[in-house]
Image (cartoon, helix red, strand yellow):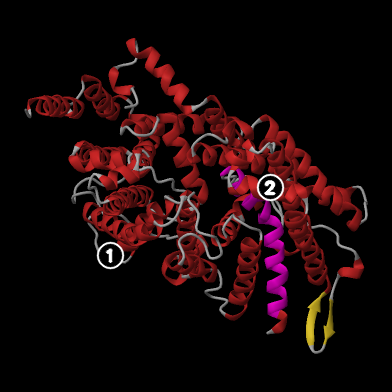
């Protein structure tokens, strides 16, 4: 029981790290980026190449799993994405689906269509017992890393100047621009960090979620649920939504193996009926 | 005193009536479609697929082009219709294909009605999530209840009775194409009537500005529910056609790729006028066929590239080119 809770939290934290970039993109620029999963996949595959082929230690590869997608993110943001901020949601959806398809096919071409695994260090394999509760070492590491990241993000958002600028830009981009905040620059940085975090999530999650070229499509619905249920006005909302989703998904698959996958859809529908604007979002005009 | 507004109203009614009238180019379009039955006998299998895709795209156009709802999971209704038709035939509940088609369409419409209330809520993002979620959920249901649906193997061993007790489906696809084309044409007529009716016009105003539409007394939600239901029915019939023609139905009918490809079909052809889906379907199938022969495994990459390119070039601008080429391209093709 507690083990399932534990696994659920690990899963949820992973989802949060994967999806938080999406929630910021959506909150700041009102931009729907369905290609977000492709950045996560880039991070995952970067780790696979580094660890399995080049023999880089796992923990040394993680920062690179952040840097590579972040760099790709900046590049794409500056060259392609920024033309689409003012466009309709339909255009954004079409564009990012197109990017996702290209990423899927390109990964398939470069790495093959089979599932790949990251070689994790021996020290992280297996479980240990803590007060009668079986705890997976790898999952514990995920909770620690993602927990630290979440605290770091929360700190950066609420205590730093950059965080204030970002929050101002989220609340009202036009006024923020008028106050002398470079909304575009703030956004480019945020986009890069969001992509990087997705990549890190992809690297950490390869073990749990599985990594193959169809990753961006498979997990698109999870990202959308996290963001739509959690709202885009803070990171607490998506965080709680991700934890809830993680626990329910793991619990559902364990207790109701036959109906497990429906649990998250049921939650999605119930939340939508009760709170159409998202579970934790403030009422806002957008 | 009331003459001035009266004249405006009459002029407006005239314009609307003019738009609803059949244009020569429309007649040419359907005449060409009918001629293909006789002129391209070797291509009937792919032509039948095109007709089904066209009907499916027409259905998406009804909600995307006329009501402005972005859907990432329109395959939900397509698949639902497909499985309905498959199950009806497999268990010999309704052997007559035309009747089974109608029943499948109604079933899909009922599903559309039920889910439309979820789609109405929230923003574009929530709509994306819900439409995608519904399609995934149905796929999962079809996968899990394998006693009924055959799970990942799909529905096998379906035998479809001859249409109207007379025209049997065979390997040449003649009956299949004529059947699919006839159904698509009839449903097109109905859709054409629908979008030019006061109901269709009110939908356009809802798409333009829901707030103002509500202010002039249009019950926005009721209209959206209605069109979503109709579109779901259309998609269900398209799916049922596919099952009947191929005598097979698998989980693939619910796939995300199908919904995404459908968006591409509609974007190629143009949204917001009924021929967009039809023209898009022809172009898409030709393109897909060509790409699949070139790179059997990675054609999805090129589909993605086409999507990206179309968006970057700008749909408005492309419509503008058409507008410029109006002397050559008939009036009909203008996006109105």
* Residue A150 found in image quarter: bottom right
Q: Is residue A11 magenta?
A: yes
Residue A171, given in percent of the width and then of the height, sits at: 59, 49
For residue A166, the mark is 2
Give the secondary structure at mark 2. helix
Q: Provide the residue span drawn in magenta.
A: A4-30
Residue reaching furthest bottom? A132
Residue B191 appears in the figure: no
Give the secondary structure at mark 1. loop
Residue at coordinates 30% horizontally, 48% vertically from top-left?
A: B234
> How far is mark 2 from mark 1, CA to CA?
62 Å
Residue B87, given in percent of the width and then of the height, sits at: 34, 63
Residue at coordinates 74% horizontally, 59% vertically from top-left?
A: A154
Residue B230, given in percent of the width and then of the height, sits at: 28, 50
* Residue B248 found in image quarter: bottom left
Residue A20 appears in the figure: yes
In contact (CB < 8 Å): disc 2 and disc 1: no
Judging from the image, mark 2 belongs to the subunit labelled: A
Instruction: Give the number of the mark in front: 2 or 1.
Output: 2
**Which one is nearer the viewer's eye here, A16 or A249?**
A16
Main SS of residues in magenta: helix
Compared with A256, B51 (above or below) is above
**Which one is nearer the viewer's eye here, B322 or A189?**
A189
- Dot 1, how many residues are within 10 Å of its Cα: few (below 14), some (14-19), or many (20+)? some
Q: Quadrant of the N terminus of chain A?
A: bottom right
Residue B247, given in percent of the width and then of the height, sits at: 37, 52
Residue at coordinates 34% horizontally, 14% vertically from top-left?
A: B326
Q: Is residue B294 magenta?
A: no
Q: Which residue is mark 1?
A: B92
């Amino acid at each position: 029981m507690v083990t399932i809770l534990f696994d659920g939290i690990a899963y949820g934290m992973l989802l949060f790290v994967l999806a938080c970039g999406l929630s910021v993109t959506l909150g700041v620029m009102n931009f729907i980026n369905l290609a977000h999963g492709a950045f996560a996949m880039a991070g995952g595959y970067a780790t696979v190449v580094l660890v399995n082929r080049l023999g880089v230690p796992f923990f040394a590869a993680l920062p690179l799993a952040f840097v590579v997608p972040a760099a790709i993110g900046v590049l794409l943001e500056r060259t392609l994405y920024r033309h689409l901020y003012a466009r309709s949601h339909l255009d954004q959806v079409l564009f990012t689906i197109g990017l996702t398809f290209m990423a899927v096919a390109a990964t398939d071409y470069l790495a093959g269509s089979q599932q790949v695994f990251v070689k994790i260090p021996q020290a992280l394999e297996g479980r240990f017992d803590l007060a009668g509760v079986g705890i997976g070492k790898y999952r514990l590491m995920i909770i620690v890393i993602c927990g630290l990241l979440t605290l770091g993000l929360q700190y950066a958002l609420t205590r730093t100047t950059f965080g204030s600028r970002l929050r101002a830009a989220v609340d009202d981009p036009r006024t923020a621009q008028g106050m002398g905040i470079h909304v575009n620059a703030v956004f480019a940085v945020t986009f890069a960090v969001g992509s990087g975090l997705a990549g890190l999530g992809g690297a950490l999650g390869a073990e749990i979620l599985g990594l193959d070229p169809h990753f961006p499509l498979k997990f698109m619905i999870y990202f959308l649920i996290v963001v739509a249920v959690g709202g885009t006005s803070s990171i607490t909302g998506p965080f709680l939504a991700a934890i809830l989703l993680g626990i329910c998904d793991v619990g559902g698959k364990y207790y109701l193996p036959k109906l497990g996958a429906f649990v998250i859809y049921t939650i999605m529908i119930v939340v939508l009926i009760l709170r159409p604007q998202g579970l934790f979002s403030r009422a806002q005009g957008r | 005193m009331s003459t001035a507004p009266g004249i405006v109203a009459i002029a407006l009614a005239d314009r609307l009536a003019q738009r609803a009238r059949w244009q020569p180019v429309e007649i040419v379009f359907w005449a060409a479609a009918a001629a293909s039955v006789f002129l391209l006998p070797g291509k009937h299998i792919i032509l039948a697929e095109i007709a089904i895709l066209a009907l499916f795209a027409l259905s998406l156009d009804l909600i995307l082009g006329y009501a402005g709802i972005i859907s990432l999971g329109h395959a939900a209704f397509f698949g639902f219709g497909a499985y309905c038709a498959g199950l009806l035939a497999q268990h010999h509940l309704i052997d007559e294909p035309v009747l089974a088609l109608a029943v499948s369409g109604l079933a899909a419409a009922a599903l559309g009605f039920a889910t439309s209330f979820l789609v109405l809520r929230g923003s574009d993002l929530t709509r994306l999530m819900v439409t995608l979620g519904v399609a995934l959920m149905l796929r999962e249901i079809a996968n899990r209840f394998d006693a009924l649906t055959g799970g990942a193997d799909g529905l096998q061993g379906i035998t479809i009775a001859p249409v109207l007790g007379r025209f049997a489906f065979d390997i040449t696809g003649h009956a299949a194409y004529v059947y699919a084309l006839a159904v698509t044409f009839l449903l097109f007529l109905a859709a054409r009537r629908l979008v030019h009716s006061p109901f269709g016009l009110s939908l356009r105003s809802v798409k333009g500005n829901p707030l103002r539409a509500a202010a002039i007394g249009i019950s926005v939600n009721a209209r959206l529910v209605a069109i979503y239901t109709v579109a779901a029915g259309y998609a269900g019939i398209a799916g049922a056609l596919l099952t009947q023609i191929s005598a097979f139905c698998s989980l693939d009918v619910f796939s995300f790729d199908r919904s995404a490809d459908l968006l591409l079909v509609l974007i190629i052809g143009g949204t917001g006028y009924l021929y967009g889906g039809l023209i898009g379907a022809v172009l898409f199938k030709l393109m897909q066929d060509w790409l699949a022969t070139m790179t059997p495994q990675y054609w999805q990459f090129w589909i993605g590239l086409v999507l990206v390119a179309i968006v970057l070039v700008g749909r408005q601008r492309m419509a503008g080119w058409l507008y410029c080429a109006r002397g050559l391209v008939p009036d009909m093709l203008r996006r109105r």
